Image (cartoon, rainbow, N blue to C red):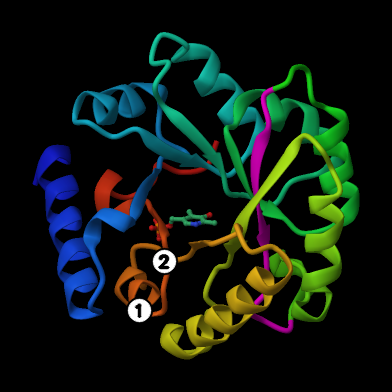
Amino acid sequence: MTLAERLSAIDEAIADAARRAGRDPAELTRIVVTKFHPASLVRELHGLGVRDVGENRQQEITAKTGELQDLDDLRWHFIGQAQTKKAAAIRRAAHTVHSVDRERLADALERAAEDDRALDVLIQVNLTDDPSRGGVNPDGLEALAEHVQSLSTLTLRGLMAVAPLDEEPASAFARLHGYAARLRAVAPDASWISAGMTADFAEAIAAGATHLRIGSAITGPRPAQG
Ligand SMILES: *Cc1c(COP(=O)(O)O)cnc(C)c1O
């Protein structure tokens, strides 16, 4: 299959999953995760109508946004674990940061503001018991949300999560759905749920995901990490 064929096959599968869940496919944003692929692939995707792309490493998003400055209607989503010292570079490159999981990172993103443009952020919540997977422990969700809301150059949009490797995605995403309700209780406008990858986007859609992060099903296998 060509890139165009894979993209349209996934978009059909997304629409089917939405209809099965009684949802309108138009309310879903499909982010194509292009990590490890060259900027030329992002350009090709843009030519196919893709406007939302996701990257998980600071050096890579910085390099690609630099190379693709002419594609000024692309929206870049940073979805990886972020080191505080990389926050300024991430803010410069990304329109949305999905992986805010601690106050220090939120503060560093706030300090990196260079103009009036607000940065959209999501709080990443950890659905596992392993802190190394990234994400705030669910116990700390409200406190982190209130902290992010106190920062004037960040706009809190919602929650992000990655399904655990050792659990059915549907049950993990059901917990996420509950956390999203808790978040809206303290931040009523923070209604985005970023969840669902190649292996589990149908389950994520059934559990209320609004933003899907799909890589390999669209791009093909990722080249070896450089
Ligand atoms: C790589 C990645 C994805 C996409 O994964 P695929 O299985 O290739 O669809 C989604 N979210 C995050 C956080 C990732 O790092």
Residue that mark 1 sits on: 203
Residue 35 appears in the figure = no
Give the residue type that dot 1 points to: Glu
Q: Where is residue 96, by image quadrant? A: top right
Q: Determine whether label 2 and label 1 are within 8 Å by CB.
A: yes
Mark before the other along the chain sequence, 2 or 1: 2
**Left or right of residue 175, residue 185 in this image:** right
Q: Residue at x 34, y 63 (%)?
A: 198
Q: Where is residue 208, by image quadrant? A: bottom left
Q: Residue at x 73, y 21 (%)?
A: 116
Q: Which residues are magenta?
A: 117-129
**Left or right of residue 151, residue 204 in this image:** left
**Left or right of residue 120, residue 141 in this image:** right
Under tag 1, what secondary structure?
helix
> Residue 135, how many percent across, how many down?
72, 65
- Of 2 and 32, the residue lying toward us: 32
Residue that mark 2 sits on: 196
